[in-house]
Image (spheres, coloured by chain):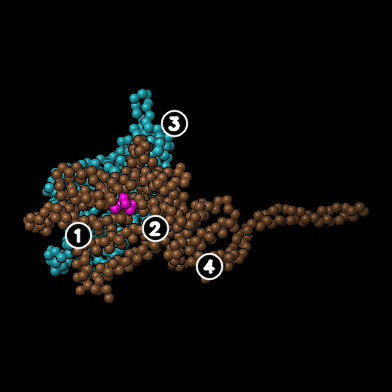
Chain colours: A brown, B cyan
Amino acid sequence: MLKKYPTVRYISQRAIWYFLTFLIALSLNFFLPRFGSDPVDTMMAQAAGGLSLEKAKEMEEGLRLSYGLIVVDKQGNIVRDTVIKIDTVVVRDTIFTTVKESVADSLGNALVNERREIESIVLRETLIERPEAVARKASVVSQLFNYIRQVFKGDLGKSFENGKPVSEIILQALPWTLALQFPAILLGWIFGNSLGALAAYKRGVFDKALFPFALLMSSVPFFVFGMALVYFFGIIWEFFPVAGGVDKSLLSPNFFEFISSAAYHYVLPFFSIFLILAGGQAIGMRSMGIYELGTDYIKYAKWLGLKETRVLAYLFRNAMLPQLTGLALSIGQMVGGALITEMIFSYPGLGFAMLNAITSNDYPVIQGVTLLITTSVLLANFTVDILIALLDPRVKASLSMDSK
Amino acid sequence: MLKLLRNLIKEPMFVIGSFLFLTTILAGLLGPSLYTAHPDAIDSYVQPFKQYELESGKHIKYWLGTDDLGKDYVALLLRGLQNSLYVGFMAGIIATTIGTLVGLFAGFKGGIIDDVLTMFTNLFIVIPSFVVLVLVSASWPEGRSLTLIAILIGLTTWPWTARSVRAQAASLRGRDHISLARINGATNLQIIFKHILPYLASYVFMVFIMQVASGILSESAISMIGLGPVGEGSTSLGVILNIAKDQGALTDKKWWGIFPAAGVITVMVFALYLLNNSMEGVFNPRLRK
């Protein structure tokens, strides 16, 4: 049907693939937290202290409901089964003995007087059957479907810490993360690739100086570099603020105040992501560039006497494309690292929200944040895939070959 | 083989990288027996984050000070180094084994097996492994051992190996010596292990080095956010950093709580990257010059 439009067909194929990946990611997001221990049990263990039995039960049921772990009928009521629960009850048995006493009445006749006396009290355990309404457990498959249905409705559950809807927490954090990571990753990629291409082309001193430095930069873990920046630029020299996304002491900042304060807080986390990323990209681009320099088409172009800038343009274009594929593949890793950077800087984005959730075992928030991260990474990948299809003549050619 | 080694030794990156990495391995292996202070011994006389203790005027008791509880940082670092190396190597071995096998079969077999395996590989490449690590670790509040974390890392990072090994194996598939082996009646397994794997050995080794580096990095990252190994004796470099940061070492200018551990991680990873890059230069002569 779409044979005439190979690019459209390719994009729709990719879209389907990413949608399937999304569903699998969703299932992983659902199953993985259930590997270790029942999250509801863990939460209850933390929260149930000090609650009465009924309250605790009600809370547990609510949690299970919000997780989609129990069956709900069409009206949204919890389906309960009556289960005969057998309880062990301690019964107090009193054992009496009859004591016979011979007494004489006033006339002197002997009488026998019987009197009951407590001999002992015995505690004894006994089983009592008692009917109890218990919410019906949903099967794992229907739990998964419940979860997926809830996610598509935008319902990610409620935070266990403060009862806020998880989607609200995420929506508050998301703009910060996007504003930090999107430019840092994009600019880091562009800057690193330009440096790498330059090093490949110039070689010599520039390459010798840049290469080890780029290698060192790319081997510094995100959080180490972040902490070094905090330590020197934030604490020792006090050039920049070390925590937060904006000055909290501004009570009702106007637009300009807000922007300038946010920009001031932005500098350190931005550079800590940007520089490390650029280092890694420069190394990749350098080897790509050197490889391309040795190819026949470059030699041919040189022999033809084409202008140097023209040759360089060909070189960059061809070396850039594998780097673009590399970007698509490593966005997930980059985002993971950048999230830790947010944690170091207490930047109010998703990473920090996740850190807070981790320290308080707030499962719904952890799960919500991880789901959103995976989704954004998939979206970013999809975008890069489309870009490659549009930019790379080789992909285009193979696409139209396929459709013939 | 000898020629290869001679070429490698000429490469300054290789020399520096192997020197640095051997030093860290030796420190991890021999350190605890040379530096006998116990990492869990708490010196309750020193204040939290004591920088160093001068005894009788000249003898330095704590070379790198103590942590918030009064534990000797040098002893902690040595144990952390040992544990980080353990996780790195174990994760590296798991990831390289799975990845190489998947990549070899996909690349060699081609066809539908290749399609399925490649789809599976790509799936786990695009789903961030960091997310998987966080989800599993967070649901495992007790009994998160070093080994468990190493296995988790190994199970989440293999797709990178699979991807690159697949590409290499696929390029070998059409070679003459493979066809010859097939005509001679060699089975698929024989071809894969006798005629393809040896060609890729140097490549797989390079991939292994990168996997160890990424194992060390992943462990320190997951520990850094408080989801690292728990239990006695499982202090890793990331755990040291996590505790130091939580106790305010960074904001209180207690540099010795942060930078020695951070430096050791960086040096290890840098050494591995140097090794990898120098080998790439030797195996791929066009990068040399």
Contact check, label 3 and label 1, Cβ < 8 Å: no
Q: Main secondary structure of the magenta part?
A: helix
On screen, A148 above or below B80? below
For the residues carrying marks 3 and 2, which lies nearer the camera in this image? 2
CA neighbours of label 4 inside 10 A, class few (<14), some (14 to 19), many (20+): few
- The Cα–Cα distance between marks 3 and 2, rounded to whole angstroms, is 48 Å
Q: Is residue A185 magenta?
A: yes
- Asked if badge 3 and badge 1 are on a common chain, one would say yes
- The Cα–Cα distance between marks 3 and 4, rounded to whole angstroms, is 62 Å
- The Cα–Cα distance between marks 3 and 1, rounded to whole angstroms, is 60 Å
CA neighbours of label 3 inside 10 A, class few (<14), some (14 to 19), many (20+): few
Q: Which residues are magenta?
A: A181-186
Residue annotated with mark 4: A76
Q: Which mark is residue B135?
A: none
Secondary structure at badge 2 equals helix
Q: Which mark is residue B45?
A: 3
Q: Amino acid at mark 2?
A: Leu
Q: Is residue A304 visible?
A: yes
Label whose residue precedes the other's in the sequence (3 or 1): 3
Residue annotated with mark 1: B168
- Asked if badge 3 and badge 2 are on a common chain, one would say no
The answer for which chain carries disc 2 is A
Q: Classify residue A221 as left or right of residue A154.
A: left
Secondary structure at badge 1 equals helix
Q: Amino acid at mark 3?
A: Tyr
Residue displayed at 42% across by 51% down: A353
For the residues carrying marks 3 and 4, which lies nearer the camera in this image? 4
Q: Which mark is residue A372?
A: 2
Q: Amino acid at mark 4?
A: Gly
- The Cα–Cα distance between marks 1 and 4, rounded to whole angstroms, is 56 Å
Q: Where residue A187 appears, x then y in whole percent?
A: 28, 51
